[in-house]
């Protein structure tokens, strides 16, 4: 299937392309994964409001309003809470409520997230724009 040129070395033709996936069982894995996802149903939450926070004594951040979210985040910052799921839910809820939260509360939330060493890139980008737009209201 190769062409022997007059100068002596073999050249493989361009149409001979290797397989895209090297894993021969990739199709079976895909079938099993999609069947599992279909079985779970449309509203299956792998993480989110129904998953819950593992920290006892702390409210569910995904269910809080804007003011309560800021208060809980500041309290968690003061007590140096290290639950990654909690901070992930705080960040997701802050992103959802980004239009409702005031600029001062945005600064407090971002300070709490940074002190907890949690980075949410989409939240940081969006909140940076919000702070720039509303800087005169601070």
Image (cartoon, helix red, strand yellow):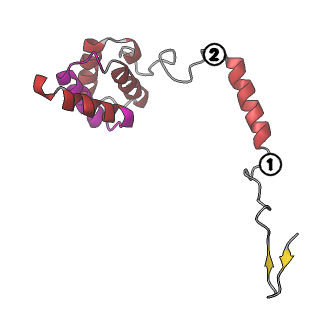
Quarter of the rendering occupied by the N terminus: bottom right
Judge by depth and name the residue closer to the eye, 95 or 5: 5
Residue 129 position (above or below residue 67): below
Q: Which residues are magenta?
A: 99-122
Q: Which residue in the structure is indicated by mark 2?
A: 42
- 82 sits left or right of 9 in the view: left
Quarter of the rendering occupied by the C terminus: top left
Label 2's element? Answer: loop
Which residue appears farthest toward the bottom when viewing the image?
7
* Image quadrant where residue 17 sits: bottom right
Judge by depth and name the residue closer to the eye, 17 or 124: 17
State how far apart marks 1 and 2 are (Cα): 29 Å
Q: Position of residue 74 (x, y in %)?
A: 23, 23
Which residue does the image show at 33% across and 18% down from the upper left?
97
* Image quadrant where residue 134 sits: top left
Q: Is residue 78 visible?
A: no
- 72 sits left or right of 13 in the view: left
Which residue does the image show at 40% across and 16% down from the upper left?
62
- 17 sits left or right of 37 in the view: right
Magenta residue check for 119: yes
**Which label sits on residue 24?**
1
Overall secondary structure of the magenta stretch?
A: helix
1 or 2: tag closer to the N-terminus: 1
Label 1's element? Answer: loop
Q: Position of residue 29 (x, y in %)?
A: 75, 37
Q: Residues within 10 Å of mark 2 (few under 14, many from 20)?
A: few
* Image quadrant where residue 14 sits: bottom right
């Amino acid at each position: 299937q190769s062409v022997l040129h007059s100068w002596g070395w073999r050249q493989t033709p361009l149409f001979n392309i290797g397989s895209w996936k090297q894993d021969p069982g990739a199709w079976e894995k895909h079938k099993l994964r999609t069947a599992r996802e279909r079985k779970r149903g449309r509203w299956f939450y792998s993480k989110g409001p129904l998953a819950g926070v593992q920290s006892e004594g702390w409210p569910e951040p995904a269910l809080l309003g804007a003011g309560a979210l800021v208060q809980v985040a500041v309290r968690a910052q003061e007590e140096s809470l290290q639950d990654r799921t909690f901070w992930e839910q705080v960040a997701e809820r802050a992103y959802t409520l980004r239009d409702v939260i005031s600029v001062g509360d945005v600064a407090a939330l971002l300070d709490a997230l940074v002190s907890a060493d949690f980075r949410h890139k989409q939240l940081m980008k969006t909140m940076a724009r919000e702070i720039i737009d509303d800087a005169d209201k601070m």
